[in-house]
Image: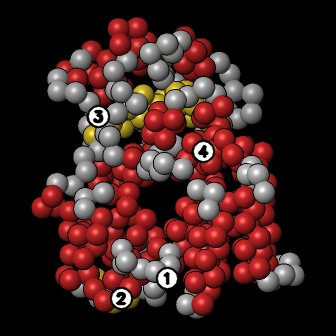
Amino acid sequence: MQVKAETLSATLEKGLKPLYLLTGDDSLLMQEASDAVRQACRRAGYTERTVFDIDANFDWSQVLGECNSLSLFAERKMIELRMPSAKPGKEGGAALRELCDCLSEDNIILIMAGKLERGADKSAWFKALDGAGITVTLWPPRRHEFPQWIRHRLQRAGFRPSEDAVQLLCERVEGNLLAANQEIEKLKLLVEPGQLDAPTLNNVTSNSARYSPYDVADRALEGNPEAALRTLNGLRAEGMDAYPVLWFVSEELRRLVKLAAHRAAGMPMDQAIRTARMMFKPHFEPAIRRLGARGLHALLRRCTTIDHCIKGLESGDPWIELQALVLRTARAGQSR
């Protein structure tokens, strides 16, 4: 059964189906829709999760075997299939049709596929999936719909934006949903909920802002300790709280940990970025080589220590600890 993206949450609240197919090429919409399905499944007791990344050489018998196997850790489990191309091929199409014949109340299948090509909804495998569960096509808002999408997002974040504020943010992100979401997350950290006008939004999201928490993370991961430290100290001088800076740095490190895991498994960088639902940045590959998985995890543990300092659970000056974290991130793997 086909369901509109905006009604997915309401559909999930009415009860779970054994299979969900999400299709689309926007990473933010795919992430949010898949997260909604996962959360509903966890609430219903599907606590175990198995993930399969589908490529041209994938062995489809693994999926069918997983569906028919008994769980060792929980009575119910989720099985995720990630299909970047939305082209299962002849063997994959047959396997998906067979999958629909062995559905069980002990399993929920979540399939995340790329944008469907014209006519794909008439294929046998798509019809089988649509008949067995819920299918959702994730369309990004069209140009004339984008301001309303921005307005709704800001309102959901607790803001009452003026028309000028909505228009300004639309111009800043130029239709990029992920960038828009990141800017709104930044606003939530730095601006109190309530009325939001264009000057306030401009001060937070300005392209020409001298210092930005984003830049701290980027400069450090680029291996530029001087620029990273200069930006960090500039934020401190401007009166910014240490927590937003830590949040942005730790988020970038977590994303690199995911990328590093995918790369270690032999996945090409472009596919790893799509799988991790990230926007490409040139420093990703060099940073992973320079820091390594072990180094990235060590830096994340350091972030936890700084978080405890901010919350008063451990002694220490958070800004001094942030300086040490930034320098360690920027200098790791480089000759002195």
Q: Are marks 4 and 3 in contact (CB under 8 Å)?
A: no
Q: Earlier in the sequence, mark 4 or mark 3?
A: 3
Within 10 angstroms of label 1, few (less than 14), some, or many (20 or more) residues? few
Disc 2 to disc 3, how far (Cα)? 37 Å
Relative side of 35 to 324, left or right: left
Relative side of 102 to 23, left or right: right
Disc 2 to disc 4, how far (Cα)? 36 Å
Residue at position x 57%, y 63% from top? 219
Q: Earlier in the sequence, mark 2 or mark 1?
A: 1
Name the secondary structure under disc 4.
Answer: helix
Residue 86 in view here: yes
Name the secondary structure under disc 1.
Answer: helix
Residues 39 and 160: in front is 160
Residue 157 screen position, x and y as percent: 41, 74
Please name the residue that numbered disc 2 is placed on. 200
Name the secondary structure under disc 3.
Answer: loop
Q: Earlier in the sequence, mark 2 or mark 3?
A: 3
Amino acid of disc 3: Lys
- In front of the other: label 2 or label 4? 4
* On-image quarter of the N terminus: top left
Disc 3 to disc 1, how far (Cα)? 35 Å
Q: Earlier in the sequence, mark 4 or mark 1?
A: 1
- In front of the other: label 2 or label 3? 2
Within 10 angstroms of label 3, few (less than 14), some, or many (20 or more) residues? many
Please name the residue that numbered disc 3 is placed on. 115
- Determine which of the numbered discs, if any, sits on residue 286 in the image: 4
Residue 175 screen position, x and y as percent: 25, 59
* On-image quarter of the C terminus: bottom right
- Determine which of the numbered discs, if any, sits on residue 190 in the image: 1
